[in-house]
Image (cartoon, rainbow, N blue to C red):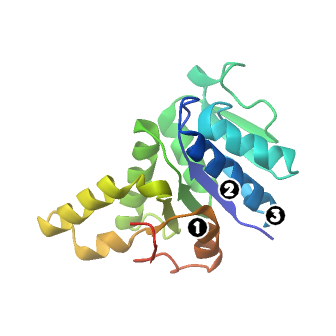
Amino acid sequence: MGIPICVFCASSNDASPRYLEVARKLGRLMVERDHTLIYGGGSVGLMGELAREVQQGGGRVVGVIPERLSTEEIAFEAAEELLVTADMAERKNIMIERAEAFICLPGAFGTLDEMLEIITLKQLDYHDKPIVLVNTDGFYDTLLGFFRRLEEERLIYKECLELYGTVSDVESALELLEAGPGSTPGADLGGS
């Protein structure tokens, strides 16, 4: 039986075609490995490409979207389960509760907000679920460098850099998550 995996990623249709393909590939692999997709419920950008690939492949899609964004143009109505929340905070809480692992693909402010919250919650021992950043074409290099700067400036402990794994491709991300608890600390499979 697969893992319910929450994926954070961009909602922009103008994202690089490379990033859109990575989202589709992750969707195909999730179906092959019987993983459930839990995500932000959108039908646009990487979110939409990922959800469509999972749904078309016969996989399970659970979308969680705030009421304000739940219009027919934005919400992925084909999801097996589409939860409409009062706000963004409730959305994140539901995704965090329902997921057993997290993957971060390229994204903007919303993706960074979700990623940093899930890392912070792990740092504070609210959960011990694996988190993997997929550093496609070096997308997260600058952010990862900033995280190292935080440690150099003694604003975080070195152990904080082990709260997540960094990989360069979605196959490695799934392998890392499938390895089980404790598999992501300090993991770097060519992603930074």
Front-most of residues 85 and 60: 60
Front-most of residues 192 and 104: 192
Structural crowding at the residue carrying mark 1, measured as other residues with C-alpha within 10 Å and reported as few (<14), some (14–19) or many (≥20): many
Taking the spot 61% from the left edge, 79% from the top edge, the residue there is 180
| Amino acid residing under circle 2 | Leu
Label 1 residue SS: helix
Disc with the residue nearer the chain's start (3 vs 2) = 2
Label 3 residue SS: helix
Taking the spot 59% from the left edge, 29% from the top edge, the residue there is 13
Q: Are marks 2 and 1 in contact (CB under 8 Å)?
A: yes
Front-most of residues 62 and 169: 169
Q: CA distance from mark 3 to mark 2?
A: 10 Å
Query: Which residue position holds label 3?
Result: 32
Q: Give the answer, above or below, for where 72 lies relative to 62.
A: above
> Residue 110 in the image: x percent, y percent?
45, 38
Query: Which residue position holds label 1?
Result: 173
| Amino acid residing under circle 3 | Glu
Q: Quadrant of the C terminus?
A: bottom left
Structural crowding at the residue carrying mark 3, measured as other residues with C-alpha within 10 Å and reported as few (<14), some (14–19) or many (≥20): some
| Amino acid residing under circle 1 | Ala
Total marks placed = 3
Q: CA distance from mark 2 to mark 1?
A: 9 Å
